[in-house]
Amino acid sequence: MSSRFLAAAATCTFAVAPVSAAQGLAAEPGGKLLLTRGISSLEGAGGGALTPWALITGNETDRGIGASGHYSYVTLEDFDIESLGGAVGFYDRFEVSYSRMTFDTREAGDALGLGEGFEFAQDIWGAKLRLAGDAVYGQDTWMPQVAVGAQFKRSKRDGLVQALGADQHEGVDVYASATKLFLAESLLANATLRYTKAHQTGLLGFGEEASVQPEVSLGYMLSRRLIVGGEYRFKPDELAFATEDNFFDVFGAYAVNSNLTLTAGYADLGSVALFDKQRGLYLSAQIGF
Amino acid sequence: MTKSAALFAALILPAAVCLAETPAGELPVDPYEISNDNAGADPLEGTALFEAFNGEAGISRVVDDMVDRNLADPRIKDIFAASDLARLRRTLKEQFCFILNGPCDYTGMDMKSSHADQGITNREFNALVENLQLAMNAEGVPFRAQNKLLAKLAPMQRDVVTR
């Protein structure tokens, strides 16, 4: 009798939980402060332009579910890189993301024997879990917001990337990020350590040897809508046929409103696929809810 | 009967003392120990920030503007509509003035006690931050100076947000 009652109570709890979660969603649209969801990195994670941050994407707080979508475009001396993707943030705690990153060889494709306009693309599925700290509220402590994440990447050029020297056409990057807003100084800082085998982020496949690569970002807030900054991303250089350089950028991100952030910058990706000095304009639009 | 009357007197007497100290236009509150420690943050150093806020008059305008924005903000107006606005404005002005190292003492309650029953969420806390930023913009407080105050207020989230 009593066990039947308990079973009924348990069923009732399970039946009610999704309803209250949905009510929570409806009751709490958005809630993050401007810019504190970050922008979207080329690999899809909430962060800066080139590196993930410990911030969780979407406008939600700990009582809601949010989302973001982005399109980013980097036009270099000889190549273009595009990224189109979306991400969902759960309770300002957990983030899942997808991004299609495309590397257009333009005329250089001909010189590389691939054909003009030949594209390397990769699908990137990401997940990020916030572990500790609060980048925004924790102003009385040195503790940053800390998150760990993984990015599963799969090149669309299975076979070709191996012919160019890669060991695999797919691989997983694992990273840990620490993000801290030094509000009294109007500064935002991030440090990420990435464990990776990727050649050129995975666009040219994955090698046998994994290494740990640091990535750093620094931003200065000029208003509650505008932050300017730079990023430096160390990268492996394991590809036999071509040198791979570290990435660097400077950017300005402007929150038009709570749903749209526009970012413009200058990216220096160094030597890419035998072509040196790949630098140029970085543009990104991100919507967020 | 006489016993309960004595008990009643014992209970009402401290409240009556408190009542006598209630500033005009405010509702009485339960007695509590008055201390600058209740402000929830140590004052900033120097006079630059107090001046950046245009002194006590500027702080007063910022607080009044922020409270007015909160009362007009559908996200949080119900929280403020239910409070003693005269007392809220006075204690907020004292708190900001104290933290900005102005010549003020804070006489309000500590952050945990004063927000204990309000069930405030992060979204609501952030809504107030936005309104405060708009009010500071309206007063012409430089962004860097705004952030010095916000950096002092931000950790109060732990006491203010209860759900």
Image: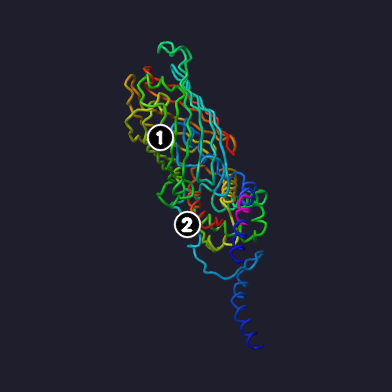
Task: Report the span colored magenta.
Answer: A12-18
Q: Secondary structure at mark 2?
A: loop
Q: Nearer the viewer, residue A251 or A106?
A: A106
Q: Nearer the viewer, residue B39 or B97?
A: B39
Q: Quadrant of the N terminus of chain A?
A: bottom right
Q: Using the numbered discs, state the Cα–Cα distance from disc 1 to disc 2 in whole angstroms.
A: 42 Å
Q: Quadrant of residue A113?
A: top left
- Residue with the mark numbered 2: B41
Left or right relative to B75: residue A72: left
Q: Are marks 1 and 2 in contact (CB under 8 Å)?
A: no
Q: Nearer the viewer, residue B51 or B154?
A: B154
Q: Residue at x 57, y 62 (%)?
A: B116
Q: Position of residue A144 (x, y in %)?
A: 42, 46
Q: Main secondary structure of the magenta part?
A: helix
1 or 2: mark nearer the eye: 1
The residue furthest bottom is: B2
Left or right relative to A211: residue B128: right
Disc 2 packing (10 Å; few <14; some 14–19; many ≥20)? some
Q: Is residue A252 magenta?
A: no
Q: Quadrant of the C terminus of chain A?
A: top right
Q: Position of residue B100 (x, y in %)?
A: 49, 53
- Residue with the mark numbered 1: A173
Compared with residue B43, is residue A155 higher up or lower down, i.e. above or below? above
Q: Amino acid at mark 2?
A: Ala
